[in-house]
Amino acid sequence: MTAARPKADSSSDESALQASAGQTATDKPLSSGEPRAGTNGLHSSTMLALVSLAVFVAIPYLHPSLERLRLLAPLPEGHGLVAVAPAAAPVASVGEAPLVVETTPQAELSQPEEVSLPPAAAEIIEPAGGAKVDKPPRSIEDPSGHALDAFFKRLRAVERKEPGSIARITYFGDSIVASDFVTATLRRKFQKHFGDAGHGFMLMANAWPGYFHNDVERFSTPGWKVSRVVGPYASDGFYGLGGVSFKARGKGAFSRFSTAKKGSFGRSVSRFVVHWLAHESGGPMVISVDGAHRETIDTQSATSVSKFSTYDVPDGPHELEVRADGPHVRAFGVVMERDTPGVVLDAIGIQGCRIRFLDKSDDAHFAEQLRARDPALTVFQYGMNESEDGELFPLDQYASTMKEVLRQVRAALPNSSCLLVGPMDRADKKAGGGYKSRPVVPKLAAIQRDVAAEVGCAYWDTLSAMGGLGSMGIWVQRGLGGADLAHPSGTGADVLGRWIFLALMEKYTEYVEQPHPPAPSP
């Protein structure tokens, strides 16, 4: 690993994977709004109407919670092989993609605070007799016995209401986390039991159509262009904590972040923290709170430097606006927290991401971003996109690149805990009926387990918790899996979030009730 480089060198493995997905190295995401190279674009009203209709039909497929609005239902059993849609492939080029859609509240994507299990799902999730589940189906694996001690130490301080105590969780993942699936349930569970210390980190705008956060209000103009760890890449390798760099396309681009207007969570904030980059061509950036000008920042600097600007407010409902007063303003995201003991969960979801893509960030920059958040627990939930790769990306390299990323994080956060959440089962429909799970999934799970133990992280086996290889078909039939046979449904995501919370609480109870020797020094 080296510093101060974009890490966008189009290695042979990434190029091969893109070729297998039908992409060239210069393709941009379809969301960029630009016609493909070599095409004439939209030159007729008929074509525009057809594209508009296609977009209307496609919208419900951008997020699992909109499944009920889909016009095209999955084929019934026995109607031929229906392959899972390819996972998002990286865009192996250096550059920026313009955002063409506003970031809006998208209330239709919200996860309900209380999710009721369908009767068919309850049969496999809850025990006979209607008793409530208070134990996870799988316990967390921690061969060292100390992988979670740092987190539990801070959680214990929060539980005792020690002044200034906050237990932050920074949760990295792919599209499941990008939609705040699993993480919304986990955040709410922790905040209900230990206290709400704020929502955490959010990107400046929706870098993907399905990017969403529960229990907060967000709005952004489409006046930003983005570089991402999944491409197009930033030439300097600076992506902030969330894997996305936002640059203003001109004067007037802005993003707003405010407390939730309904629900039990996210109703108050005590401080906003803006993550941005001072750099050679930076322009003025205007910060307003509750409609009043707070500060104008000159983001120009002879050298590129990460900055974290904090704006304190009386605890309660508030709104912050970040506005570019000229082109080339670069920002990464905004944090919302409170001055009260509790838990914060940063949902760092990157659509199409594999865990190795986190190494596309400049090493020193990424470490600086991690230390600025100071999480007590860092979680990594990857594997869905790797299951799309199959073994085109060699499994020995999968293990070595994962180790490299985790060791970098561990070095940046020596006093933080680490947890790997294993991959879900993933299936395809068989031509003769039924489902067939992808055989690479248990291989990925086994590698994650081994790597977690080697680098000192805990591990939770999602595949076994679901029921093992072959469980995704059952989950889909019972309303817990998505029609793509890869993602959970909204209900399934809530189940996974509850299970992870219960698994952590099981270990936390052991930590509190039983004497443990101090964790060894890193």
Image (cartoon, rainbow, N blue to C red):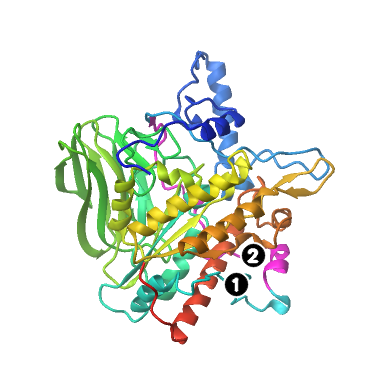
Where residue 478 sits in the image (x, y, percent)?
Answer: 71, 58
Where residue 398 sits in the image (x, y, percent)?
Answer: 54, 47
Question: Is residue 260 visible in this depiction of the protein?
Answer: no
The answer to if 111 sits in the magenta stretch is: yes
Task: State the image quarter where residue 140 is shown.
Answer: bottom right
Which residue carries the number 1 mark?
136
Check the image and report above or below for 218 versus 145. above
Left of 414 or right of it: where is 301? left
Check the image and report above or below for 459 versus 282. below
Overall secondary structure of the magenta section: loop
* Kind of residue indicated by mark 1: Pro
Q: CA distance from mark 2 to mark 1?
A: 8 Å
Left of 250 or right of it: where is 343? right
Q: Secondary structure at mark 2?
A: helix
Q: Residue at x 26, y 68 (%)?
A: 339
Instruction: Please state which of residues 455 and 6 is positioned toward the viewer in this rendering.
Output: 455
Cβ–Cβ under 8 Å for marks 2 and 1:
yes
Q: Residues within 10 Å of mark 1 (few under 14, many from 20)?
A: some
Instruction: Please state which of residues 140 and 456 is positioned toward the viewer in this rendering.
Output: 456
Question: Is residue 334 visible in this depiction of the protein?
Answer: yes
Q: Secondary structure at mark 1?
A: loop
Q: Quadrant of the C terminus?
A: bottom left
What residue range appears in magenta? 97-126
Q: Earlier in the sequence, mark 2 or mark 1?
A: 1
The answer to if 274 sits in the magenta stretch is: no
Left of 182 or right of it: where is 368? left
